[in-house]
Image (tube, rainbow, N blue to C red):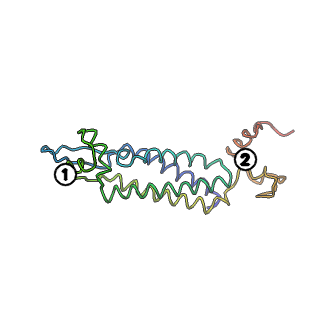
Amino acid sequence: MIARARLLAVVAIVLTGALGVISSTQTWLTVVLDDGTGHELFVPGAAAVPVLAPLSLAVLALGAALSIVGRVVRWIFGALTVLIAVALGIVTGQVAVALPVTAVSSTVTTATGITGIDSVAALVRTISPSPWPFVTLALWVLLLAAGLFTLATAHRWRGSGRRYRTDGEGADASAPASRPRDAIDSWDDLSRGTDPTDEPR
């Protein structure tokens, strides 16, 4: 399990980030206006939760970078993942359960030109959620689990740069590699200016 910990964490974080971006484009709420015609407005996730798209993109970036960073940065990224998951979970849960007028105000204002929370609230007859807020809330639970998993296991991940260390941390820098080289090792060599295709003489 530990040998695959990095892969599991990276896949889970990248997946939730990607699905969060997709969710931001989907209809979260349907608003019926009390304007005499019962006009319906459809509120996408990005309008209901303005931070949804940018934070989902941040999660994507964290997940991608997590595959190549060292131990200390893994912990930092794991902590950031947990914080983002908690923040998004709170705001998503509020929209899904409380159905606040603030979540639809920008859409109503764009459609009607009416501004101000009180004025918008007076114009809104009903607000009903689609499945997307609840699906997205489940995503943030998965993201929280992935962040906590990262914090718990990051120190045992196979570090691509561990054999280069000379400060006594991790494996002995002079010890030969005890595992096959992978793409991350080649990336590590390139970042140090070494051509991984060169055969030792």
Q: Position of residue 131 (x, y in %)?
A: 32, 53
The quarter of the picture where residue 184 lies is top right
From the viewer's perspective, tell me whether residue 92 is left or right of residue 115: right
Instruction: Pick the quarter of the image with the C terminus.
Output: top right
Amino acid tagged 1: Arg
Quick one: 170 or 107, which is closer to the camera? Answer: 107
> SS for tag 1?
strand
Q: What crowding class fits label 1: few (fewer than 14 Cα within 10 Å), some (14-19), or many (20 or more)? A: some
The quarter of the picture where residue 139 lies is bottom left
Amino acid tagged 2: Arg
Q: Mark 2 — residue?
A: 181
State the residue at coordinates (79%, 49%).
Answer: 164
Q: Mark 1 — residue?
A: 125
The quarter of the picture where residue 21 lies is top left
Residue 48's disc is none
State the residue at coordinates (31%, 59%).
Answer: 98
Q: Farthest residue toward the right?
A: 201
